[in-house]
Image (spheres, rainbow, N blue to C red):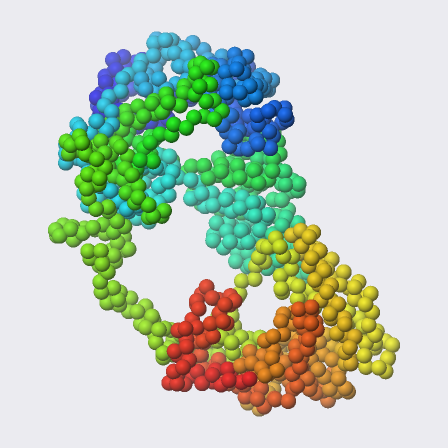
Amino acid sequence: MDSNVFKHLYERCKERPFLKKVIVARSFAQGDQWLTRICKENGPLMNVETTTLESLIVRNTKSQLSHRKIQLLNREQGYWLVYELMLTHMPENNGYVSREGVTAGIVERFHCALQGLRLAGIKAAQLNPLDFENLSKGRYVIHLLSLYEQELARRSWTDLAGLSELLPEGDPGAIEYMISSSHYESLNRLEREMLDRLSGNKLYIWQEGRLFPESLAQHDREQIQLFRAAGTLAETREVIGRIYQQEVPFDQVELILSDYTGSYVAIHTLMEYLNIPSTFSQGISASFSNLGKAAIAYLDWLDSDFRVEVLIQAFRNGILSTRSLEKGELNMTPLQLVRMLEQSGIGWGRERYELLDIYTEHFGNPEHTAACTAWSLLFKELLIRLPEDRNWSIQDVLEGLVLFLENCTDIVDAHDHSVLTSLKEQRDSLIILEPSAISSESAVRYVKDSVMNLCIKQASPQSGHLHISSLENGGESGRTHTFILGMNDGAWSFSAKEDPILLDEEKKRIGGLRTMAESVKQAKQERAERLGGISGYVSLSYSSYDPVNQQDNHAAFELLQVCRGYTENEDMDFSEMNALLGRPAGFMAQQGNSNKDKSRNRLDRSEFWLGRLVAEGKVFLAEEALSATFPCSIRFKKEVQGDTLTEADGLIQPHGEMAIRYRGNSGIHLSVTELERYAECPKRFFYGSILKVREKDTPVFDRNIWLGPADRGNLLHEVFYRYLKERADFYLVDEVEDRTLQHDYSRLEHITDETISEYRRLIPPPSPHVFEQECKAIRQDVDVFYQTELKRQTLPKWFELSLSTDEHPLEVVLDSETVLFMKGFIDRVDELRPHEYKIYDYKTGNPRKYGENAYFAGGTQLQHALYAVAVEQYLRQTGLDPEARVTESAYYFPTERGKGEEVLRVQNRKPELVQLVKLLLDSIESGVFLGTPHADSCRWCAYKPVCGNQGDLVKAKWENEQNKLLLAWKEVNAYA
């Protein structure tokens, strides 16, 4: 509405100041803006209020609803009533919509159609199946409407249309009702009748003023700005830049987004980034709030078959809180609690959360036991809300969601509180309906859509805030500067797609219903009248290019009309319009030649830097400009790309308390795996052993795999250990002179079945088929093991031998200068002859890399030799065999893949081992932690996301003979 209409309304309200005036608006926000503008532009008013028609009707029927004990259904309750009727009450063979076809989208269409019929005052008894395109459809719609009417009557419920029977006559002498002509014409039949009844048929209807875009002809030429941009973000940045340049107060600016849904995310992000206070007429999605993100995390958890990684990630990102777990004497940090959940091995699957109870029994640490118990209780409380058969009602999901948010989140602001309150209201509103169970996927999808559709930060214009509105409700703030963004053809055109449930021809035959063409005409009229009230400075723009989809956009016809009026050229076409608008504004504002343009304030650092580095579309002197501000970064880049070993590559000079010393240091211990890791890649050793950055070990969900390589290897180890231990114990009891075991295949089968059952309890398989296939493969591996052991001529003596004394690391003396403290486990030790032993390391992979000519394999295969020395000294130190000698080691592949192969390593190269270990320790203690020059080693490295593939960069340093600190590592790599 324009100022003349507001002045007219002001004068009308002043005529009888003591008579209450009620202005009926389309929304409360619209009414508030109208009243604010009337008073601001004309003066104060008394005894005037604004409201919506629905609120007015509900307020006037409240006493009758209470007296007759009738429940008014809101829109969502009405939707679920229709859903229930279509799913359970309609005949299965109705010839139109099968029960399998009852989806959320279909129900939404039928619900809208029923509401349209009821607000037109049409009842089921008045409809004729012949009015529809086919009889099946007509009978279905009539039957559904009849059921809806019967259910409302039976349960003492009503909807907005039903309030017409409860609405009393109004007193025109007490209240004067006022409404715009376009609004009144857009009302349905019953809505008009109810408003006429309240006003006593003395309703005041005012006529609208000027229409957009013709209304811009009243503006001075200097008050209109026109431009185009290359993308939504560039368009918004250009607008904000102009606001800063013109020094316009934020509370004198309104941004009207032509495509609110598609652009508000980018604009909200920019407002937050630039710290510009702003209000959004339609709000923003609740998913921007912490509680909204938490709700989405919970629903994603349900949707992913309870993958624990979804929740762990949300906990790590600070979206979820462990507050409810941190009770009593539990003295653990949130990070420790989340880490415990991550290590639980749950992975996915509802039934796997029972693992928490199993782990509770195994923990020796009271704190860990308490933490595991707390997690277990929380998940039990969450899961008990959801039926196990995966058929859930919407209320089931909402109940679980609210409980989850109350226990696993911190409400940090009013937005979080409003999200939780809205979800509770949704949950409570469904109690009276008792909705039927549907598939879990459908229930979760509906609730997720509900969360995404919840709005926060929805507000009318406020002092000190830039106001952002939509094409559907903008243009009524009365602010001095209005920017209409995104005037693209798609955003400004109206869809003429017919309602598939009630086609236009059907509406005409039924009568009293508005066709799609009529609805579009009214919507266009309403928009033109609303935007016609824009006053002051106006900027109109559109995005001529979509950088995401890399395609050109077309301007709206309304923008062309404005340009024609602006230039007084009625024959202007779109190409001439684009020439008038000039070069599209990009991410960085263009600089002119004037001093004013050159001194223009930049929006942020990125634009500042681009302004320094770019001229006439070209980048110049980038490195020189950056080096002045970021000298360390430039130096780092040069050092990494150079051939000299420096700190940038992983060279550190530890000293004092930070010195790295393993030789003779009982305070720290090494494992053979760590030494082998250093030989392969010092940087990986640095991340894992020095910085203690653990590799990711969360179970990965795969519907085609039951046990991963590590779990499968552990299962086979367990079978081999239990079987051989039992056979060895029988050997000792029977005192057999023969130095071979008596084997029993039936016992091996029994132990295998028992172990598989235990693992199945700990790690439920994704499907029976996958379980059967993997069990078959495991039994084939066990068969290979059995056939190999039948041929063995040695006697197993010890299994899972721990290299420690009194739980302290074992002191291993290589020579007088090299003493290490080590920890580790030996899979198996066999006796070859009295006092002569052979150690085995079980492998479940491929024996290919353990070649005959790779005794040390460049330091990456030390286990056989170093463990031989360690076991020999351990047996002597503990008195198990004071004369013990380990003469052989073997990598043993007792699986079908390994064919039962043994890779033998005769232990006759101890001097070389000592020298190799010394070189490794020299390199470690000198602070060399360069990445590997072998790119293949990076392929499966867990730290690759941190350091990237540095093979090519490292080669230059590796080949540079001036890097003396690399000599020790090079010598290690030369050992075959």
Measured from the top left, where is residue 456 in percent x and y?
A: 41, 38
Measured from the top left, where is residue 570 in percent x and y?
A: 17, 30
Relative to 396, 200 lies left or right? left
What residue is drawn where x is 51% and y is 47%?
297
Name above or below for residue 660 compared with residue 700. Answer: below
Question: Does residue 807 appear anywhere in the picture?
Answer: no
What residue is drawn where x is 83% and y is 74%?
742
Measured from the top left, where is residue 719 in percent x and y?
A: 73, 66
Q: In which quarter of the image is the N terminus?
A: top left
Measured from the top left, where is residue 558 in percent x and y?
A: 26, 31
Relative to 458, 396 lies left or right? right
What residue is drawn where x is 79% and y is 75%?
790
What residue is drawn where x is 71% and y is 76%?
828
Residue 520 is drawn in which quadrant?
top left
Name above or below for residue 16 compared with residue 946. Answer: above
Q: Which of 317 and 559 is in front in this view?
A: 559
Question: Does residue 529 appear anywhere in the picture?
Answer: yes
Residue 531 is drawn in which quadrant?
top left
| Callout count | 0
Q: Nearer the viewer, residue 795 or 504?
A: 504
